[in-house]
Image (cartoon, rainbow, N blue to C red):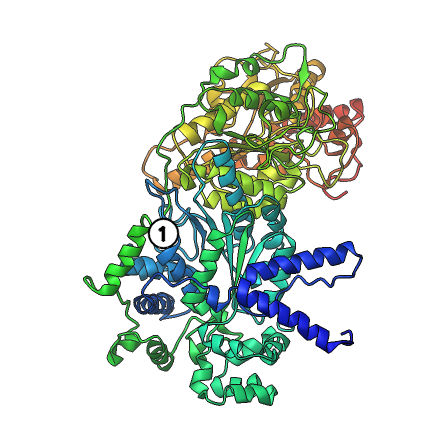
């Protein structure tokens, strides 16, 4: 620290500052300091920078608004909810700890939630679209407890906590399991913060495009300080600052503990997060100290108390709260004699009662109100609490507290006494659920507050008020007719389908095209000028390509969401749009297109969450297939996304080959998701390989949707010709078609060619039939769709080839009641010419032909020498390395 050369002058400056604060207020003082700093910088004076403010509450006591509620009544309600939250977990684990659950997280956050429920969070009503609250997953018992206290859940339901098979309360927030209660799945840590940011941005999008009035709605994200270590938690906060999302409020429960120990034992998580968020352009409000500290802080004229507060690391603060008042006196205040004198008139109990800000409703209310009033920036509230607050020796502030599922009778008695819960001594061991008495002041107050805010939360809308009138398949007539002599990719076919939808007079405004930063890659640059890229500030510059037809255009009412090189962000935008039917009663139709390799592999957790949220929309895996994106090599070549998408039960997946298949699939998705309001979403892979597309054959629509149809019968009319069935999807179907020609021309084998747009849907259909047959042994056996389709064809083996690993087409093996051989692209990708890649991965026409001849030989229809001759004829190297391991 630089030596003070003129203490007298220094004191004059400080006195002047005190005078301004006293007579003109802190706003004036802030203005003057900003002016001084700007002047210093202009003069070249090195100005010290700190992203941190002192370790004190951001809002001083004299600027706190008057609390609008009855603190005593709210305390009694809050205490009852605390008890019932504990009871939910303890009773679920009374016999054993098999079911699990969490006590400590909600106990630390109870005040943070209750102030919101009582005074801030609007339910969806005629006068308000509803606030969106991302509940921290481990706090779910407290939310169930409040719903029980409100009369929304019964005691019987509480007793079935984590017993989800028969419809009990879900362990964490899961819309799939509780579709009328939870809105957002949040326990996969980091996804809640990320999704909340893009949810807030999507509300701005809807408002700017006059699709929904979202001006007075807010997104509240409840997060844990340990959760902020997840890259996703902080990964998009700069976007929130850049986009000025003043409808977004993060509440970070800084109880200083992770699952196993301190979050920042050797540092200060609140100060660290303050710097990170302030640097990203957020308004930061710190709620560190409760009201009991106000007198001490005001008396700290020398700054010694603040010094002690700032020199203590979080590991020490955790230690203090795991002990007692005498320990705090000795180890916190006792470091400096002056601080001991400051608390000399306080008993140990008084010192222990010095609360942290996150447990003080007055402090929390002031922070929430300030956040609501703040404009042009998102707000983060850093609220200091104690993990396991009130649990005493069972886990308050202790490293083991996150795993606690038991509390002995002595501890429960202390818990009851601490929160002044009206519970007779003889009932403590019973751990009863305690409802609010009808007619009591507390009962009336609870319901009055929620009535004033429009109803009860959490609550989820299962169906939008309106079902959309989607276009008929005939709207995509140009795709159904084929491309004629022109060669196009399925990506281009999709862009034409998308453009048709964007121009549709009934649903065009509902379509949300989403790209990371690949519009030109996918041939979508024509959308820039026609529909614009959404930007809250419009376009503040003239793009360098302004003189071109397809110039880059940002617009306040733009329809396209371009998210930059940011797949998780783009996926979160897609989720916000795909669940808008529920969160906003405004069904939207999102199409998110991306490199397929960077889809389920990179954002699989978000894709799973979207299934949990009952999302409705289209995911387009562009440049798909392991041999189709020929110039990008190992990192980009996707041969497995269809296997990954199949793990999500409500994700309907397709790998189309021709433009008419794309059109039929999209039309079916529109019908199911937006006319019939089914809770499914679609994954469609698209290729960048150009070729001619035929017109749609008659009567194949059902087969396309179900996943299999006969594309072309064998040309051979010889009655005794050997017969095979060739199946393919994506671009490899074209190799199967070529193989069919080789088999007929060179080997006299008749080959029927089948398009299989979805081995995933075929496999699911087969498993459903298999299950039904197992459980109904006395009834007529059901056939899978695959079995039924192949049953009408002549005998002979089946060969399937795709641009994906063999596990993809293997899904239907049990339902192919004949010899079945699968070719696929197992192994790491390569960069080369497509013909070389298909030869390398053994899925080209020659390998399909060899495989068919081998299967015919295995059946005894042809001699094995035929396959050997084919290997020689087509130059196949039988000793080449296995691509699965090369």
Along the viewing direction, whichever of 516 and 119 lies nearer the viewer: 119
Q: Position of residue 183 (x, y in %)?
A: 42, 47
Residue 664 location (% of width, % of height): 51, 22
- Counting from the top left corner in percent of width and height, residue 262 is at 58, 71
User: In which image quadrant can residue 487 be found?
Assistant: top right
The part of the image, by quadrant, that contains residue 517 is top right
Q: Is residue 62 left or right of residue 450?
A: right
Q: Nearer the viewer, residue 538 or 558?
A: 538
The residue that label 1 is drawn on is: 457
The answer to whether 440 is drawn above or below residue 502 in the figure is: below
Quadrant of the rendered image containing residue 116: bottom left
Residue 115 drawn above or below residue 749: below
Q: Residue at x 39, y 42 (%)?
A: 129
Q: Which of 301 and 532 is in front in this view?
A: 301
**Residue 44, position as x, y percentages in the image:** 80, 57
- Does the rendering let one see residue 104? no
Of the 4 image quadrants, the one containing the N terminus is bottom right
Quadrant containing the C terminus in the rendered view: top right
Q: Which of 851 and 273 is in front in this view?
A: 273
Q: Residues within 10 Å of mark 1 (few under 14, many from 20)?
A: many
Q: What element carries label 1?
A: loop
Number of numbered discs visible in the structure rendering:
1
């Amino acid at each position: 620290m630089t030596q003070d050369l003129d203490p007298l002058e220094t004191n004059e400056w400080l006195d002047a500052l005190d005078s301004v604060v006293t007579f003109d207020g802190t706003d004036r003082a802030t203005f003057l300091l900003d002016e001084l700093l700007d002047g210093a910088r202009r003069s070249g004076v090195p100005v010290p920078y700190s992203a941190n403010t002192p370790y004190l509450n951001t809002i001083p006591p004299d600027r706190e608004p008057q609390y609008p509620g009855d603190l005593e009544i709210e305390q009694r309600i809050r205490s009852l909810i605390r008890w019932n939250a504990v009871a939910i977990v303890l009773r679920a684990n009374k016999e054993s700890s098999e079911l699990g659950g969490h006590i400590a997280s909600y106990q630390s956050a109870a005040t943070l939630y209750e102030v919101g429920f009582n005074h801030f969070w609007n339910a969806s009503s005629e006068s308000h679209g509803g606030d969106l609250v991302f509940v921290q997953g481990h706090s779910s018992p407290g939310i169930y407890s409040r719903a029980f206290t409100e009369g929304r859940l019964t005691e019987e339901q509480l007793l079935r906590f984590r017993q989800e098979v028969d419809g009990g309360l879900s362990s964490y927030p899961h819309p799939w399991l509780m579709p009328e209660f939870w809105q957002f799945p949040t326990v996969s840590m980091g996804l809640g913060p990320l999704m909340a940011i893009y949810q807030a941005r999507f509300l701005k999008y809807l408002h700017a495009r006059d699709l929904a009035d979202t001006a007075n709605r807010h997104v509240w994200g409840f997060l844990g300080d340990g959760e902020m270590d997840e890259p996703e938690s902080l990964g998009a906060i700069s976007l929130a600052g850049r986009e000025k999302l003043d409808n977004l409020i993060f509440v970070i429960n800084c109880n200083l503990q992770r699952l196993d120990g301190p979050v920042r034992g050797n540092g200060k998580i609140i100060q660290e997060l303050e710097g990170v968020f302030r640097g990203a352009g957020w308004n930061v409000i710190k709620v560190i100290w409760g009201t009991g500290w106000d007198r001490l802080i005001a008396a700290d004229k020398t700054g010694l108390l603040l010094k002690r507060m700032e020199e203590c690391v979080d590991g020490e603060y955790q230690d203090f709260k795991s002990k007692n008042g005498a320990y705090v006196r000795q180890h916190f205040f006792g470091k400096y004699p002056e601080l001991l004198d400051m608390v000399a008139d306080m008993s140990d109990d008084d010192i222990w009662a010095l609360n942290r800000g996150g447990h003080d409703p007055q402090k929390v209310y002031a922070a929430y109100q300030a956040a609501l009033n703040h404009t042009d920036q998102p707000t983060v509230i850093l609220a200091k609490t104690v993990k396991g607050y009130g649990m005493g020796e069972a886990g308050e502030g202790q490293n083991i507290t996150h795993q606690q599922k038991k509390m002995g009778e002595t501890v429960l008695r202390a818990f009851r006494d601490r929160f002044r819960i009206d519970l007779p001594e003889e009932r403590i061991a019973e751990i009863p659920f305690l409802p609010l008495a009808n007619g009591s002041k507390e009962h009336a107050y609870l319901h009055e507050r929620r009535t004033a805010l429009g109803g009860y939360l959490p609550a989820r809308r299962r169906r939008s008020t309106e079902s959309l009138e989607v276009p008929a398949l005939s709207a995509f007539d140009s795709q159904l007719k084929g491309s004629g002599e022109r060669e196009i990719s399925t990506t281009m076919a999709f862009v034409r389908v998308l453009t048709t939808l964007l121009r549709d007079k009934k649903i065009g405004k509902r379509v949300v095209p989403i790209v990371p930063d690949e519009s030109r890659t996918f041939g979508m640059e024509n959308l820039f000028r026609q529909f614009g890229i959404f930007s809250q500030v419009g376009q503040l510059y003239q793009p360098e390509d302004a003189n071109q037809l397809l110039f880059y255009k940002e617009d306040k009412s733009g329809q396209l969401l371009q998210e930059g090189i940011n797949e998780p962000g783009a996926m979160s935008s897609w989720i916000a749009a795909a669940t808008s039917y529920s969160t906003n009663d405004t069904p939207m139709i999102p199409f998110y297109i991306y490199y397929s390799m960077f889809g389920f592999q990179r954002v699989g957790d978000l894709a799973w969450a979207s299934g949990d949220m009952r999302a409705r929309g289209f995911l387009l895996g562009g440049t798909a297939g392991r041999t189709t994106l020929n110039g990008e090599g190992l990192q980009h070549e996707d041969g497995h996304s269809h296997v990954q998408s199949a793990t999500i039960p409500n994700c309907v997946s397709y790998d189309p080959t021709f433009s008419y298949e794309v059109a039929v699939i999209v039309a079916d998705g529109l019908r199911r998701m937006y006319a019939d309001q089914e809770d499914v979403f679609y994954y469609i892979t698209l290729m960048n390989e150009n070729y001619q597309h035929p017109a749609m054959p008659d009567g194949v629509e059902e087969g396309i949707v179900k996943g299999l149809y006969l594309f072309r019968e064998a040309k051979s009319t010889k009655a005794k010709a050997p017969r095979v069935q060739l199946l393919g999807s994506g671009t490899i179907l074209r190799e199967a078609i070529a193989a069919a020609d080789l088999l007929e021309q060179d080997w006299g084998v008749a080959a029927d060619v089948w398009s299989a747009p979805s081995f995933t849907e075929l496999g699911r259909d087969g498993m459903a039939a298999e299950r039904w047959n197992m459980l109904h042994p006395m009834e007529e056996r059901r056939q899978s769709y695959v079995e039924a389709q192949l049953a009408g064809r002549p005998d002979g083996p089946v060969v399937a080839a795709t641009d994906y690993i063999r596990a993809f087409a293997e899904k239907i093996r049990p339902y192919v009641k004949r010899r079945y051989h699968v070719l696929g692209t197992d192994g790491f990708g390569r960069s080369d010419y497509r013909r070389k890649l298909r030869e390398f991965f053994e899925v080209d026409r020659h390998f399909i032909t060899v495989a068919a001849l081998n299967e015919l030989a295995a059946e005894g229809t042809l001699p094995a020498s035929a396959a050997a001759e084919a290997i020689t004829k087509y130059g196949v190297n039988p000793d080449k390395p296995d691509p699965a391991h090369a």
